[in-house]
Image (spheres, helix red, strand yellow):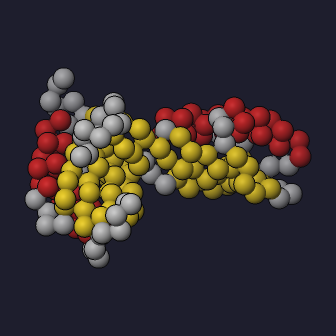
């Protein structure tokens, strides 16, 4: 692979669950000129440890650089690049302005993509959907012909399959 080729990378960082850890991690990316496309974090099954998942675009060299520099942060326990052997998910909420004439068509699209209607009013509905970022992008493309009022996405989170990578 060309080391100068820009690609999307996703890294998982296990950190001490303490104040300002997410700020220190995200500011490291900013100081190094990396644009974060997704940043999620939450406590793990151990309340003393949080998992931060960061997606960004960069070269293979940039990925290596950010892994090395992030690992040096005091509160970082473990860091690794996610790969094709990982599971990725994201949550989407979408509010669509609609009337009775469009509802059944929208509901069919939502069903095909295995989403849920979580709110329905006379003039709108709210759709909830989880899945890979690519699935959600495809759903949004299908919905572009309707009057989308609002969209909220959580950002990607993920885990490597098996136990060997995260130990």
Q: Report whether 148 appears left or right of 12.
A: right
Identify the residue at horizontal 70%, vertical 46% (top origin): 116
Quarter location, residue 62: top left
State the quadrant of the N terminus: top left
Q: Residue furthest bottom?
A: 19
Q: Position of residue 146 (x, y in %)?
A: 72, 42
Placement of 34 over or under 45, stated as above or below:
above
Q: Residue furthest right?
A: 100
The one of 4 and 78 positioned closer to us in this rendering? 78
Give the total number of marks visible in the rendering. 0
Q: Report whether 103 appears left or right of 17.
A: right
Q: Position of residue 149 (x, y in %)?
A: 67, 55
Q: Residue furthest top?
A: 1
The one of 40 and 139 positioned closer to us in this rendering? 40
Quarter location, residue 50: bottom left
Placement of 81 over or under 43, stated as above or below:
above
Residue 57 makes an appearance in the image? no
Q: Position of residue 88 (x, y in %)?
A: 43, 41
Identify the residue at horizontal 25%, vertical 67% (top origin): 16
Residue 117 makes an appearance in the image? yes
Q: Report whether 143 appears left or right of 35.
A: right
Identify the residue at horizontal 20%, vertical 53% (top origin): 78
Quarter location, residue 8: top left
Placement of 109 over or under 80, stated as above or below:
above
Identify the residue at horizontal 61%, vertical 53% (top origin): 93
The one of 130 and 125 positioned closer to us in this rendering? 130
């Amino acid at each position: 692979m060309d080391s100068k080729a820009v690609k999307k990378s996703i890294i998982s960082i296990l950190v001490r669950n303490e104040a300002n850890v997410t700020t220190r991690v995200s500011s490291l990316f900013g100081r190094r000129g990396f644009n974060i496309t997704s940043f999620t974090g939450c406590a793990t099954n151990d309340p003393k440890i949080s998992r931060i998942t960061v997606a960004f675009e960069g070269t293979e060299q940039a990925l290596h650089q950010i892994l090395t520099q992030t690992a040096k942060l005091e509160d970082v326990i473990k860091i690794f690049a996610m790969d094709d052997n990982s599971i990725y998910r994201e949550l989407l909420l979408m509010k669509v302005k609609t009337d009775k004439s469009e509802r059944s068509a929208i509901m069919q699209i939502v069903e095909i993509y295995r989403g849920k209607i979580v709110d329905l009013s006379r003039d709108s509905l709210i759709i909830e959907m989880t899945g890979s970022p690519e699935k959600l992008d495809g759903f949004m493309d299908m919905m572009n012909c309707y009057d989308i009022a609002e969209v909220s996405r959580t950002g990607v989170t993920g885990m490597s399959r098996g136990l060997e990578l995260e130990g």
